[in-house]
Each structure stands twice: as structure tokens, then as C-alpha cells.
Image (cartoon, helix red, strand yellow):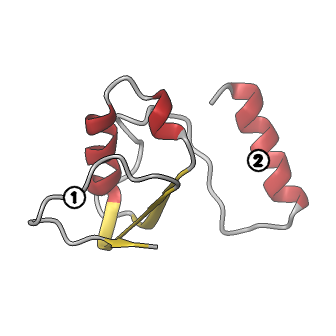
Amino acid sequence: MTAATLDKEKESAAIAGLTNVEFREGFGEQLPVLNNWADATISNGMLNLMPDKLKALIEMFRLLSQVKCFSRKVLLLAPSSATKMHLC
């Protein structure tokens, strides 16, 4: 996401009156959030742009809380049997 795109998204959220939205600059393979920070992740094509898709998926699961809710148009990789995941 470019700086201009990030600014536009912040503006769109403000216009929509969204107060529960947060935008952070970072890379998909190294997201700037703590472990278990999010209840859900949504990817709408972002994984297609990642050079290391597996690393990006692992990073997305790192930040998920115990709920492990992941949503994507098409799931590229099935989770291992050791990972409990519910698709939203």
C-alpha cells in the first residue's frame, strides 16, 4: 500500500465515521502488531502480491487470537491439523 493509498483509506474511514479502524504501514511478511492482537484477518487479494506467500500466511496466523478467524476469497493453503482455524 502506498502512502497515498494509506492516506485515502484513512480519509474514507473518517468520512464513513468509522472509529474502530486502525491503519499501520508495514509488510505482509512482518506485520507491525503483537502476537494474538486480532480476532480476524481479511485478505482480499493481498496474498497474490506477496513473494513469500507461506511466510505471509504464517505471519497472519501469528497475530490472530485463539479464535483463528481467517477470511479470503480463495484459500490457497489448508491449515495443518495442529492449527485450529474457523473460516468466517
Image spot of residue 86 (x, y percent): 34, 74
CA–CA distance in space, label 1 to label 2: 32 Å
The residue wearing badge 2 is 10
Residue drawn at x 34%, y 63% is: 64
Residue drawn at x 77%, y 37% is: 7
Residue drawn at x 74%, y 32% is: 5
Image spot of residue 36 (x, y percent): 31, 64
Q: Which mark is residue 43?
A: none
Image spot of residue 55 (x, y percent): 26, 36
Q: Toward the viewer: 7 or 77?
A: 77
Mark before the other along the chain sequence, 1 or 2: 2
Q: In the rendered view, does 17 fall on the left or right side of 26? A: right
Name the quarter where the N terminus is drawn: top right
Q: In the rendered view, does 81 fall on the left or right side of 23? A: left
Q: Toward the viewer: 58 or 36?
A: 58
Q: Amino acid at mark 2?
A: Lys
Q: In the rendered view, does 80 fall on the left or right side of 5? A: left
Q: Which mark is residue 79?
A: 1
- Closer to us: mark 1 or mark 2? 1
